[in-house]
Image (spheres, helix red, strand yellow):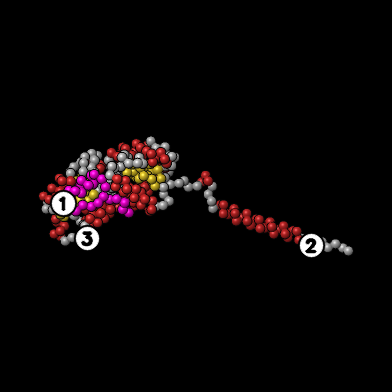
Amino acid sequence: MTASNPPRDEPRIHLDSTAHIMNSISSQLAGRLRLVPPIGRRRPALPALVLVAHGSRDPRALDTVRALTDRVRGLRPALPVHLGHIELNEPLLPDTLAALGDTPAVLVPLLLGRGYHVKQDIPEMAAAAPARTRVAAPLGPHLLLADALHTRLTEAGWPATMDAAMRRSTAVVLAAAGSRDPDSATDTRRTARLLADRLGVPVVPAYASAATPTIGTALHALAARGRHRVAIASCFTAPGRFAAQCAAQAPWLASAPLGAQEPMARLILHRYDRSLTAWSAEAA
């Protein structure tokens, strides 16, 4: 009998089919791998955002800046956000920067104008950090800061509408910490003008220390002009001794410190973004 053998081309068909499948898998895999950038060409991680608070012996201040830090994280979850203090509270800014290691960082001062801390203390601490750092502008002056001040006044009882007679007797004292640096006073005056544009009544800056006029002097000057209904707008990030002393002098109403409002968190991110854009432009 003649042995039955398989057709001579059957192995060829099987091998050709296997090769086709393997080639197809390889092509698809290569296509997917092309979508993943090589490690050397991956976009570097964004610099960390470090909120720089002054620090206070009042425990409410630490609670406030922590809440504000959390609010910033909530608005931009992918961004690493950290907190550091100039003095009095932990973590201190040098410790925060040391913990970041070689991660670059943008430092946003939780201060409302230029002064010694913005010009000297924070840049010196940043320069000693192990990684590249950049110090952003302080939070004031800015329209978002005026928004936050307006909100706090409204919460304290500022009327939604006023007639002409009421406007003639009403004013606001913008109470700030004070500084010997003239740039700080310039920034506070600009914030006062932004708030005055919003409210439609005069807003006079005054200071808790180190600058003039004092709160009392500003109140007397306004009373001499027929402005007897005067509110104190607290231009402080968090509760503390100065904020309490200023509020206690209010002849009518006083707003709470700015705290962890959304406009404050948005302003912090705005300062971070502006600083990051300038940093990128300089590098380019």
Task: Specify the amino acid type for callout 2.
Answer: Pro
> Can you give x and y, in whole percent of width and height, for residue 180 in the image?
23, 39
Instruction: Tell me whether circle 1 and circle 3 mark residues in contact (CB < 8 Å).
Output: no
Instruction: Tell me whether circle 1 and circle 2 mark residues in contact (CB < 8 Å).
Output: no
Q: Can residue 190 be seen?
A: no
In the image, is residue 258 part of the stretch drawn in magenta? yes
Instruction: Tell me whether circle 2 and circle 3 mark residues in contact (CB < 8 Å).
Output: no
Mark 2 packing: few (<14 Cα in 10 Å), some, or many (20+)?
few
Considering only order in the chain, which callout, 2 or 1, is on the residue closer to the N terminus?
2
Name the side, left or right, on which 16 lies relative to 281: right
The stretch of residues the image draws in magenta is 239-262
Above or below, 162 against 128 in this view is: below
Total numbered circles:
3
Q: Which residue is mark 2?
A: 7
Q: Which residue is mark 3?
A: 160
Name the side, left or right, on which 84 lies relative to 188: right
